[in-house]
């Protein structure tokens, strides 16, 4: 076949002529070239493949659904084209549609089955309005199968996922809320006999309906509700680490962070200011600026880099249980908080500690890049500690630097990466949170479970096929 014939065939496959328009599958986008006679002011429209939601045809019409962006907001849009007679009876249109959808979705699964939990009181209480305004039309345009549940009480979603017999039939569990609902869903799944299998195989994602929205910010890199909905539609599966937190005889699964001291108080003790949204944290910080609380504690940490591991997969998911079976939660490699610690752990005494923060994502909310070096699947948790005696000026400097993530350069900020740790507080009362949710203030122990969780991440771009 001559080069000219190959070129003509390629053009034929990527170009479709319809009444009053020509549809071209260019590099990175769909181009709609309209007849100048009918559309004198707008001769062409370009739609990124990322924004193409769905396409289908009858014997007479071709319909394309896509997300149209205006003022940084995505809205569902539809274009209907009349087919020309010569294309009506052939497979030409269907082949062109398939090529369009292949480029639009790449490695992502189209027409996802989504189980959505909507918290009506999350954040400022606008989650319901945001969902129906921005997400629902995009899900409909992408022909997603949606099962929507509006939570009625605390623990509703936890009960629902625990009892769901068909939970592994969903392509994603979508939490329209702040970070409390993903935490609730994860811990509901953790109570199942097949918890490990479900956590590792069913993605959990977030639409930003709360104050923090850390899961959305870290995975989708956006606080836009409409863009988060699009990235749910086009999202790529991504394993993430999860963490076990033990207190007394209880075990919790954490996806985000553990926090005691000054910063925990700024979050937990401003719950009555939810009407301020994310600004309530700043108010709490300024209230404590000149008299930061003291949270003395003993800290034990374990860093596998300090030991010689003969097995490079030691401690990884596959060595803890059979990843192919419908297993429960992995065993605790270091036992619970009630067990004695191995000699390989290092003990530290911090009598005047004010800030203890541990996490595995860079952002703990939309504007706080507390752990800039964190990686969601490296098997490690980042820890930051600060002393209460550093003074108001240094604390204010910390507050100003956190949004850009350059506070780790301050000598007063002590940072490390570990795979497990234990905190023994000196005081009996105080503020302690797991993933932003208030928890009992007592000794706790944390260990990382590499790649125990699954989520979706925003595509870097739709691949040409």
Image (cartoon, rainbow, N blue to C red):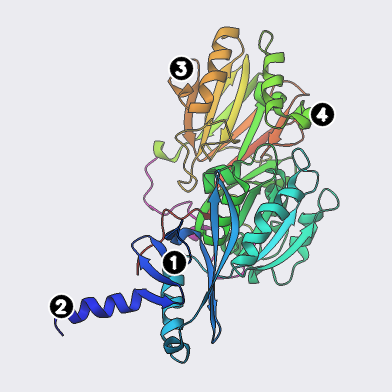
Earlier sequence position, callout 2 versus callout 4: 2
Relative to the observer, which residue lies in front, 358 or 51? 51
**First along the sequence among labels 3 and 2:** 2
State the CA–CA distance, disc 3 to disc 2: 62 Å
Whether residue 330 is visible, yes or no, is no
Name the front one of labels 3 and 1. 1
**What segment carries the magenta color?**
307-328
Which circle's residue, 3 or 1, is located before the other in the chain?
1
For disc 2, the marked residue is 3
Residue for badge 1: 37
Between disc 1 and disc 2, whose residue precedes? 2
> Is 397 on the left or on the right of 95, as rendered?
right
Judge by depth and name the residue closer to the eye, 11 or 370: 11
Residue mark closest to the camera, 3 vs 2: 2
SS label for mark 3: loop
The circle on residue 410 is 3
User: How far apart, in angstroms, are the residues tagged by discs 4 and 3?
Assistant: 32 Å
Q: CA distance from mark 1 to mark 2?
A: 35 Å
Question: Element at badge 2?
Answer: helix
Crowdedness near tag 2: few (<14), some (14–19) or many (≥20) residues, C-alpha within 10 Å: few
Give the residue pinned by disc 4.
Answer: 272
Comes first in the chain, label 4 or label 1: 1
* Separation (CA) of disc 4 from disc 1: 60 Å
Q: Position of residue 235 (x, y in %)?
A: 52, 58
Tell me which corner region of the image, top left, top right, bottom left or bottom right, holds residue 276: top right
Residue drawn at (83%, 48%) of the image: 154
């Amino acid at each position: 076949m001559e080069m000219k014939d190959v070129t003509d065939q390629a053009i034929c496959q990527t170009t479709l002529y319809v009444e009053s328009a020509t549809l071209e599958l260019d590099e990175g986008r769909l181009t709609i070239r309209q007849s100048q006679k009918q559309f004198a002011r707008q001769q062409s429209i370009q739609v990124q493949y990322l924004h193409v939601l769905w396409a289908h045809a009858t014997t007479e019409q071709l319909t394309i659904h896509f997300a149209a962006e205006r003022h940084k907001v995505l809205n569902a849009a539809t274009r209907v084209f009349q087919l020309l007679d010569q294309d009506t009876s052939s497979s030409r249109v269907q082949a062109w549609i398939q090529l369009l959808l292949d480029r639009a979705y790449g490695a992502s699964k189209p027409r996802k089955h989504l189980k959505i939990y909507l918290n009506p009181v999350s954040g400022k209480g606008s989650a319901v309005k945001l969902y129906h305004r921005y997400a629902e039309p995009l899900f409909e345009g992408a022909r997603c199968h949606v099962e929507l549940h509006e939570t009625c009480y605390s623990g509703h979603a936890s009960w629902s996922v625990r009892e769901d017999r068909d939970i592994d039939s969903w392509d994603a569990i979508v939490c329209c809320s702040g970070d409390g609902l993903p935490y609730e869903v994860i811990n509901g799944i953790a109570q199942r006999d097949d918890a490990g299998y479900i956590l590792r195989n069913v993605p959990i994602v977030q639409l930003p309906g709360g104050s923090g929205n850390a899961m959305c910010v870290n995975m989708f890199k956006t606080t836009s509700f409409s863009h988060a909905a699009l990235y749910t539609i086009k999202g790529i599966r991504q394993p993430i680490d999860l963490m076990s937190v033990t207190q007394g005889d209880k075990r919790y699964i954490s996806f985000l962070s553990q926090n005691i001291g000054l910063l925990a108080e700024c979050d937990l003790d401003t719950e009555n200011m939810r009407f301020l949204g994310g600004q309530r944290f700043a108010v709490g910080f300024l209230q404590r600026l000149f008299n930061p609380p003291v949270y003395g504690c003993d800290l034990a940490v374990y860093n596998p880099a300090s030991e010689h591991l003969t097995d490079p997969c030691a401690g990884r998911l596959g060595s803890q249980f059979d990843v192919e079976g419908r297993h429960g939660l992995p065993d605790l490699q270091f036992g619970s908080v009630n067990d004695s610690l191995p000699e390989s752990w290092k003990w530290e005494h911090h009598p005047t500690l004010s800030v203890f923060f541990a996490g595995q994502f860079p952002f703990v909310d939309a504007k706080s890049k507390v752990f800039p070096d964190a990686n969601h699947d490296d098997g490690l948790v980042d820890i930051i500690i600060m002393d209460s005696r550093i003074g108001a000026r240094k604390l204010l400097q910390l507050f100003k630097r956190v949004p850009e993530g350059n506070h780790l350069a301050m000598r007063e900020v002590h940072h490390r990466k570990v795979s497990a740790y234990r905190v023994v507080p000196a005081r009996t009362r105080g503020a302690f949170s797991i993933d932003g949710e208030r928890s009992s203030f007592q000794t706790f122990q944390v260990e990382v479970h590499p790649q125990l969780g699954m989520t979706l991440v925003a595509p870097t771009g739709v691949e040409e096929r």
